[in-house]
Image: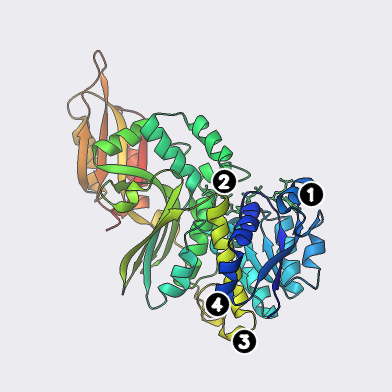
Amino acid sequence: MKPIKVGLLGIGTVGSGTFNVLKRNQEEITRRAGRRIEITMVADLNTARAKELTNGECEVVSDANMVVNNPEIDIVIELIGGYGIAKDLVMKAIANGKHVVTANKALLATHGNEIFKAAQDKGVMVAFEAAVAGGIPIIKALREGLTANRIQWIAGIINGTTNFILSEMRDKGLDFDVVLKEAQRLGYAEADPTFDIEGVDAAHKATIMSAIAFGLPVQFDKAHVEGITKLQATDIRYAEQLGYRIKLLGIARRTPNGIELRVHPTLIPAKRLIANVEGAMNAVLVQGDAVGATLYYGKGAGSEPTASAVIADLVDITRLATADPEHRVPHLAFQPDAMVDTPILPMSEVTTSYYLRMRVADQPGVLADVTRILADSSISIDAMLQKEPDEGETRTDIIMLTHQTQEKNIVSAIAKIEALSTVVGEVTKIRLEQLS
Ligand code: NDP
Ligand code: HSE
């Protein structure tokens, strides 16, 4: 059979990994795909670097439109990133009847509905395994491997940069900025690293997973997003003393009232496997009603780990390119006419447990006042830590772990606690998940 021809848009970190792995493992990949997969055209703004990387083995152009408009190209791989030119090119490729592979979670989380609709109408595939958790085949697992299940919840460490930062800060006592620079040097961080540290990248990925898990349209605008920039080393230490680790988790959970879709720093019991995922590694825990809990672990970023997922998509498309479009795996796992419109819950309606830290005057009655406020809001306390004040200090820290309550209850209780004359400054609140 004649080779399938691929056009690559963007030969940066992931693009170069894709080119190299495809070349290195060409024979093995061909045996799996049933025909050769050849990158015949590459577009990149830096044509000199692109020519050097591709060593004269394919045509290199600076205008990506030449690739998406080339009738010889069967599959377009979009590895430019962002929602501007990347969206334009993906839509043009689809309109020109080309299948698309992309690692661009930002694009799919915000414009996925429009892109999948266009692809469905045109009978082409849009594959995006690399968009969530890099090299871990989590899209395949959710969409195909777990298809028998009613998925109950997903909780994932799905941003390598922030996990790397949290691990290095805890283990080596390094400063936030130093570790962020290292993550950028290693190619983990997004072009705009605020997407990583403010939780936006993890929320893009959680949004995509929630759509596939529950059969919903992608709804990034409804996700609750909090990053790690406000997290203090003190809280990481206190959490450890209470037997917990703090991780930036992406959570999608089905509840009777709607879907929880949220990203925030989260305390997890230190004994859970996922709490021990360190460095730039990613892990996704999925709870299905039939299978129970399954855990997927691996490299969530980097050149060749991400290329592994991009090439898996190329092989899938190559195998299915000649199949009747009606018989392919649906983009979002559920048939397009069987999607549901279950609401995404506002954060105030989410139910979870909490870690609270407050600085208080070291005098009788303070603790009683705080616990009374919590009791009046029907919030019960699971564990507590009261520090001895330092020598000559008249204030101390109280740390509490609560049982589950709705976010709106804890928010109103915290407002009352902060109004006490014996409480200094703001109460720190971090959500806690048992993940059991
Ligand atoms: P890079 O910035 O390393 O690569 C992007 C490449 O695209 C660069 O070579 C850039 O050229 C080129 N480019 C920019 N604009 C254009 C254009 N208009 N036409 C042609 N080429 C263009 O990004 P990554 O490889 O890290 O990321 C690519 C995608 O993969 C993103 O969507 C990212 O979110 C996603 N991703 C990345 C992972 C990672 O580990 N890095 C992991 C998972 C997903 P120049 O440098 O000259 O601007
Ligand atoms: N910036 C992302 C991360 C790349 O750090 O996980 C992988 O999507």
Kind of residue indicated by mark 3: Asp
Q: Which residue is disc 4 drawn over?
A: 330
N-terminal of the two: label 4 or label 1? 1
Q: How many other residues sit within 10 Å of disc 2, few (<14), some (14-19) or many (≥20)?
A: some
- Asked if the beta carbon under badge 1 is closer than 8 A to the nearest atom of ligand 1, the reply is no
For the N terminus, the image quarter is: bottom right
Circle 2 SS class = helix
- Asked if the beta carbon under badge 2 is closer than 8 A to the nearest atom of ligand 2, the reply is yes
Circle 3 SS class = loop
Horizontal side, residue 387 vs residue 72: left or right: left
Q: Which residue is disc 1 drawn over?
A: 47
Q: Which residue is disc 2 drawn over?
A: 195
Horizontal side, residue 27 vs residue 99: left or right: left
N-terminal of the two: label 3 or label 4? 3
152 and 71: which is toward the camera: 71
Q: Looking at the image, which residue sits at the far front?
A: 27
Q: Which residue is drawn at 31% across and 33% down?
A: 237
N-terminal of the two: label 3 or label 2? 2
Kind of residue indicated by mark 4: Pro
Q: In which quarter of the image is residue 289?
A: bottom left
Vertical order, 261 against 426 (above or below): below
Alpha-carbon span between mark 1 and mark 2: 27 Å
Please indicate, yes or no, whether residue 76 appears anywhere in the rendered image: yes
Please indicate, yes or no, whether residue 313 appears anywhere in the rendered image: no
N-terminal of the two: label 3 or label 1? 1
N-terminal of the two: label 2 or label 4? 2
